[in-house]
Amino acid sequence: MVMYPTRYHRPAGLDEAIGLFTECEDATYLAGGHTLLPTMKQRLAHPSDLIDLCVLPGLRGIGLKDGVVSIGATTLHAEVAVSPIARQWIPALSGLAGSIGDRHVRHRGTIGGSVANNDPAADYPAAVLGLGATVVTDRRRIAADAYFVSLYETALEPGEIITRVEFPIPDQAGYAKFRSPASRYAIAAVFVSKSGAAVRVAVTGAGAAGVFRAHALEAALEQDFRPGAIAPNQVDPAVLLGDLNGSPEYRASLVAVLARRALGHLGEARSYK
Amino acid sequence: MQRVNLTVNGVPVSREVDDETLLAVFLREHLELTGTHVGCDTTQCGCCVVHLNGTSVKSCTVLAVQAEGGHVTTIEGLARDGTLHPVQEAFHRCHALQCGFCTPGMIMAAVDLIETHPEPLTEAIVREEMEGNLCRCTGYHNIVKAILAAAEAMRPAKAAAE
């Protein structure tokens, strides 16, 4: 497969990257490239210019400060998966990173790229929403609840660059995914977390408009944070996706099953296929 | 066009390429290192796996310009002075191939797996971690056997390195 011609840029800093974005006719930021480059090869995208964010200094690495795990935008999935900080404080998050794609994909894919792209079947959006994380950009801080808009759509403005994602450390969290063995993307996946009395349940892979919070499940789990609190009919199929992998009704059932499994294996990310 | 400078299998190389040139195409067509295969060309099959700066990547999904200044190892760079790498040797001994098309990617992925996996490999771990490499002959059984045999053979060297 042959891409349309494009120009590749290695900016020296954030300012230069944003300047290039403004100057170029139809520029796109490039991170790990594991969604963008396949899309360009299929000629579904043909940006005039690619601005490589992975060469920027200061955007890569994992830190811990004031009860928050902060992950730089160009940190690789493979790095989050083995990070001692992530594994100690939010093992469901490191486990989730280690369950993305395959090992070669995890050697290139980045958290910033995944969160910016907001693929409706991607893993990271579930963790960002399910932990109530904050997406930090070159110009502002965006709460997870205000960040995800719809399929491949986020609150990011044109040219805005994610610099890091800040995850507050929960008391408990778990992730369970049922994935397509072919694409390795989630057909449905559920991220559950509990911080004090507050419970968050985020669902990816199954929503007709992308990642979403299952408020009925949250209310049930705030009463009783155990697998048995999940009833089979708490997610309305009307908000779910139907495709060759499954009908909305099938996904509604999967969400309940996966929520129970996430609760049954807190501190882990489990993949089923 | 941009100039790309890489070290490939220990040899410095420098070429002018179109910006959209993929690393797999750069290796195969510009350097004529055709051991790296392109199977699906959609980031699924892993036939194009090479090592970039010490980790396995699907070279059909990396631009040559993204690798600028980097070190690349391909299947041609594994053997030393005519002696096969232990993973190559194990694939040969276990007959871990049928048509052979996926073999270069399988071997490069297996070397990365054996060298970097923190725990001793088991059949289950190998099958899970090798999911990014597809064999169109479905000849996985002997591939898994070969990787486990190679991991065993490489254990003293890995222990010494740690």
Image (spheres, coloured by chain):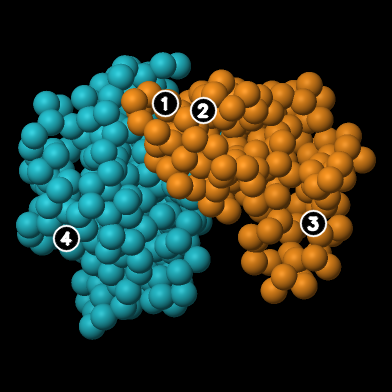
How far is the residue under mark 3 from the one under mark 1?
A: 38 Å
- Name the residue tied to disc 1: B17
Q: In the rendering, which numbered label is found on residue B151?
A: 3
State which mark lies toward you, 4 or 2: 2
Closer to the camera in the image, A199 or A128? A128
- Name the residue tied to disc 4: A136
Q: Chain of mark 4?
A: A
Q: Are marks 2 and 1 in contact (CB under 8 Å)?
A: yes
Q: Are marks 4 and 2 on the same chain?
A: no
- In the displayed orientation, state which residue is furthest to the right: B93
For the residue labelled by badge 4, is the local secondary structure a helix, a strand or a loop? strand
Q: Colour of chain B?
A: orange
| Identity, as a three-letter code, of the amino acid under mark 3 | Ala
How far is the residue under mark 4 from the one under mark 1?
A: 36 Å
Q: Colour of chain A?
A: cyan
Q: Chain of mark 3?
A: B
Closer to the camera in the image, A77 or B84? B84
Mark 3 or mark 2: which comes first in sequence?
2
State which mark lies toward you, 3 or 2: 2
* Label 1 crowd bin: few (<14), some (14–19), many (20+), radius 10 Å: some
- Name the residue tied to disc 2: B26
How far is the residue under mark 4 from the one under mark 3?
A: 42 Å
State which mark lies toward you, 4 or 1: 1
